[in-house]
Image (cartoon, grey):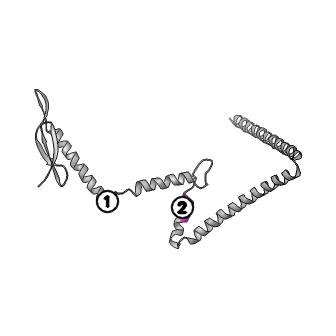
Amino acid sequence: MLKISNRKHQSHKASQCSVDKRKAAQHEKYIIEINQTMMQINDDELQLVYQDIIQQSNSQEKNKVECHQKLIDFVKKLPDNHLKSAINLFDTMRYTKGQNKGNLLSPFLQNKALNFINSSLYKVGQDSDSLIRNNKALKNKLHVAHIVMNNFEESAFGKLMLVGFTNCTSSKSSLFGVGTSRCIQQK
Protein backbone atom coordinates (compact mmCIF):
# COMPACT_ATOMS: atom_id res chain seq x y z
CA MET A 1 0.00 0.00 0.00
CA LEU A 2 2.88 2.34 0.76
CA LYS A 3 4.39 1.83 -2.72
CA ILE A 4 1.23 3.11 -4.43
CA SER A 5 1.29 6.19 -2.24
CA ASN A 6 4.98 6.77 -3.04
CA ARG A 7 4.29 6.34 -6.76
CA LYS A 8 1.42 8.76 -6.58
CA HIS A 9 3.62 11.27 -4.76
CA GLN A 10 6.43 10.84 -7.30
CA SER A 11 3.97 11.22 -10.18
CA HIS A 12 2.56 14.39 -8.67
CA LYS A 13 6.06 15.76 -8.10
CA ALA A 14 7.10 14.96 -11.68
CA SER A 15 3.98 16.59 -13.15
CA GLN A 16 4.57 19.69 -10.99
CA CYS A 17 8.18 19.90 -12.28
CA SER A 18 6.88 19.61 -15.84
CA VAL A 19 4.37 22.41 -15.25
CA ASP A 20 7.07 24.62 -13.72
CA LYS A 21 9.38 24.01 -16.72
CA ARG A 22 6.59 24.88 -19.17
CA LYS A 23 5.80 28.09 -17.24
CA ALA A 24 9.49 29.08 -17.23
CA ALA A 25 9.79 28.39 -20.97
CA GLN A 26 6.64 30.43 -21.67
CA HIS A 27 8.00 33.26 -19.50
CA GLU A 28 11.28 33.24 -21.43
CA LYS A 29 9.37 33.26 -24.71
CA TYR A 30 7.39 36.35 -23.63
CA ILE A 31 10.56 38.16 -22.58
CA ILE A 32 12.24 37.42 -25.93
CA GLU A 33 9.15 38.66 -27.84
CA ILE A 34 9.02 41.84 -25.77
CA ASN A 35 12.75 42.49 -26.32
CA GLN A 36 12.37 41.98 -30.08
CA THR A 37 9.40 44.35 -30.18
CA MET A 38 11.25 46.98 -28.15
CA MET A 39 14.21 46.83 -30.56
CA GLN A 40 11.90 47.56 -33.48
CA ILE A 41 10.17 50.66 -32.05
CA ASN A 42 11.69 54.15 -32.07
CA ASP A 43 12.72 56.13 -29.00
CA ASP A 44 9.57 58.27 -28.83
CA GLU A 45 7.28 55.22 -28.84
CA LEU A 46 9.53 53.50 -26.32
CA GLN A 47 9.25 56.52 -24.02
CA LEU A 48 5.43 56.44 -24.31
CA VAL A 49 5.31 52.71 -23.54
CA TYR A 50 7.58 53.22 -20.55
CA GLN A 51 5.40 56.05 -19.21
CA ASP A 52 2.23 53.97 -19.70
CA ILE A 53 3.70 51.06 -17.76
CA ILE A 54 5.02 53.23 -14.93
CA GLN A 55 1.84 55.33 -14.73
CA GLN A 56 -0.34 52.22 -14.69
CA SER A 57 1.58 50.72 -11.77
CA ASN A 58 1.56 54.10 -9.98
CA SER A 59 -2.18 54.56 -10.55
CA GLN A 60 -2.87 51.04 -9.25
CA GLU A 61 -0.85 51.83 -6.13
CA LYS A 62 -2.64 55.18 -5.79
CA ASN A 63 -6.06 53.48 -6.09
CA LYS A 64 -5.04 50.94 -3.47
CA VAL A 65 -3.98 53.70 -1.06
CA GLU A 66 -7.22 55.62 -1.72
CA CYS A 67 -9.33 52.52 -1.02
CA HIS A 68 -7.46 51.87 2.23
CA GLN A 69 -7.92 55.48 3.27
CA LYS A 70 -11.67 55.40 2.50
CA LEU A 71 -12.07 52.27 4.60
CA ILE A 72 -10.08 53.75 7.50
CA ASP A 73 -12.09 56.99 7.35
CA PHE A 74 -15.36 55.04 7.31
CA VAL A 75 -14.34 53.00 10.37
CA LYS A 76 -13.20 56.14 12.21
CA LYS A 77 -16.60 57.75 11.62
CA LEU A 78 -18.49 54.78 13.08
CA PRO A 79 -20.05 55.35 16.49
CA ASP A 80 -18.58 53.28 19.31
CA ASN A 81 -21.65 51.07 19.59
CA HIS A 82 -21.26 49.99 15.91
CA LEU A 83 -17.61 48.94 16.14
CA LYS A 84 -18.38 45.44 17.45
CA SER A 85 -20.89 44.94 14.64
CA ALA A 86 -18.33 46.08 12.06
CA ILE A 87 -15.72 43.67 13.44
CA ASN A 88 -18.27 40.85 13.40
CA LEU A 89 -19.21 41.77 9.82
CA PHE A 90 -15.59 41.46 8.68
CA ASP A 91 -15.19 38.19 10.59
CA THR A 92 -18.37 36.48 9.36
CA MET A 93 -18.69 37.69 5.77
CA ARG A 94 -15.89 35.43 4.56
CA TYR A 95 -15.78 32.31 2.44
CA THR A 96 -15.65 29.30 4.76
CA LYS A 97 -14.27 26.80 2.27
CA GLY A 98 -12.97 26.44 -1.25
CA GLN A 99 -10.23 28.29 -3.05
CA ASN A 100 -11.35 31.65 -1.60
CA LYS A 101 -11.42 30.41 2.00
CA GLY A 102 -10.81 33.30 4.38
CA ASN A 103 -11.38 36.01 1.74
CA LEU A 104 -14.25 38.46 2.07
CA LEU A 105 -17.43 37.52 0.23
CA SER A 106 -17.74 39.00 -3.25
CA PRO A 107 -19.88 42.13 -3.69
CA PHE A 108 -22.38 40.00 -5.63
CA LEU A 109 -22.89 37.64 -2.67
CA GLN A 110 -23.02 40.57 -0.24
CA ASN A 111 -25.82 42.12 -2.33
CA LYS A 112 -27.64 38.76 -2.46
CA ALA A 113 -27.48 38.52 1.34
CA LEU A 114 -28.78 42.08 1.72
CA ASN A 115 -31.64 41.43 -0.73
CA PHE A 116 -32.57 38.27 1.18
CA ILE A 117 -32.63 40.19 4.46
CA ASN A 118 -34.69 43.00 2.97
CA SER A 119 -37.19 40.65 1.35
CA SER A 120 -37.68 38.37 4.34
CA LEU A 121 -37.26 40.51 7.45
CA TYR A 122 -38.68 43.83 6.36
CA LYS A 123 -41.86 42.75 4.57
CA VAL A 124 -44.70 45.25 4.82
CA GLY A 125 -47.56 43.89 6.89
CA GLN A 126 -45.50 41.22 8.60
CA ASP A 127 -45.77 42.57 12.13
CA SER A 128 -47.16 40.27 14.82
CA ASP A 129 -50.69 41.72 14.75
CA SER A 130 -51.12 41.24 11.00
CA LEU A 131 -49.70 37.73 11.23
CA ILE A 132 -52.21 36.87 13.98
CA ARG A 133 -55.08 38.27 11.87
CA ASN A 134 -53.92 36.31 8.82
CA ASN A 135 -53.63 33.17 10.93
CA LYS A 136 -57.19 33.58 12.26
CA ALA A 137 -58.54 34.16 8.74
CA LEU A 138 -56.83 31.00 7.50
CA LYS A 139 -58.21 29.00 10.44
CA ASN A 140 -61.72 30.27 9.63
CA LYS A 141 -61.33 29.27 5.97
CA LEU A 142 -60.17 25.83 7.06
CA HIS A 143 -63.17 25.55 9.40
CA VAL A 144 -65.53 26.49 6.54
CA ALA A 145 -63.88 23.92 4.27
CA HIS A 146 -64.40 21.21 6.91
CA ILE A 147 -68.07 22.13 7.26
CA VAL A 148 -68.57 22.05 3.50
CA MET A 149 -66.87 18.67 3.22
CA ASN A 150 -68.94 17.27 6.11
CA ASN A 151 -72.23 18.53 4.59
CA PHE A 152 -72.00 16.55 1.35
CA GLU A 153 -74.58 13.76 1.18
CA GLU A 154 -74.90 10.85 -1.21
CA SER A 155 -78.15 10.60 -3.19
CA ALA A 156 -79.39 8.84 -6.29
CA PHE A 157 -78.26 11.85 -8.33
CA GLY A 158 -74.76 12.08 -6.84
CA LYS A 159 -73.34 14.25 -4.07
CA LEU A 160 -75.40 17.20 -2.85
CA MET A 161 -74.34 19.91 -0.44
CA LEU A 162 -76.73 20.55 2.41
CA VAL A 163 -77.38 24.06 3.66
CA GLY A 164 -74.95 25.16 6.37
CA PHE A 165 -74.13 28.39 8.12
CA THR A 166 -70.76 29.32 9.63
CA ASN A 167 -68.40 32.23 10.23
CA CYS A 168 -66.04 33.18 7.35
CA THR A 169 -64.25 35.99 9.12
CA SER A 170 -64.94 38.07 12.19
CA SER A 171 -67.24 40.43 10.26
CA LYS A 172 -68.79 38.09 7.65
CA SER A 173 -70.78 34.88 7.71
CA SER A 174 -71.10 32.30 5.00
CA LEU A 175 -74.36 30.79 3.82
CA PHE A 176 -74.15 27.59 1.82
CA GLY A 177 -76.96 26.27 -0.30
CA VAL A 178 -77.12 23.35 -2.67
CA GLY A 179 -74.22 23.85 -5.08
CA THR A 180 -73.63 27.51 -4.10
CA SER A 181 -71.64 29.42 -1.55
CA ARG A 182 -71.33 33.11 -0.78
CA CYS A 183 -70.42 35.40 2.13
CA ILE A 184 -72.97 37.86 3.48
CA GLN A 185 -72.48 40.78 5.89
CA GLN A 186 -73.53 40.15 9.49
CA LYS A 187 -75.88 42.70 10.98
Query: Dot 2: within a 10 Å radius of its alpha carbon, few (fewer than 14), some, or many (20 or more) residues?
Result: few
- Where does the magenta region start and end? 86-94
Mark count: 2
Q: Secondary structure at mark 2?
A: helix
Above or below 118: residue 22: above
Q: Which mark is residue 181?
A: none
Residue 179 lies in what quarter of the image?
A: top left
Q: Furthest-bottom residue in view?
A: 80
In the image, 95 versus 120, the foreground residue is: 120
**First reached walking from the N terminus: tag 1 or tag 2:** 2
Give yes or no for contact between labels 1 and 2 (Cβ–Cβ under 8 Å). no
Tell me residue 169's x, y (percent): 20, 52
Disc 1 versus disc 2: distance between alpha carbons?
A: 28 Å
In the image, residue 154 lies in the stretch drawn in magenta: no
* Residue 131 image position (x, y, % from top left): 30, 56
Q: Is residue 89 left or right of residue 64?
A: left
Looking at the rendering, which quadrant does residue 57 occupy? bottom right
Helix, strand or loop for the magenta stretch, by majority: helix
Q: Secondary structure at mark 1?
A: helix
The image's mark for residue 128 is: 1
144 and 12: which one is in front?
A: 144
Q: If the image is split into quadrants, where does the N terminus sit?
A: top right
Give the amino acid type for the residue marked by disc 1 in the picture: Ser
Is residue 34 toward the left or the right of residue 125 in the image?
Answer: right
Q: What residue do we see at 47% from left, 53% from top? A: 115
User: Which residue is tagged 2?
Assistant: 89
Residue lying at 21% horizontally and 49% vertically, measured from the top left: 140
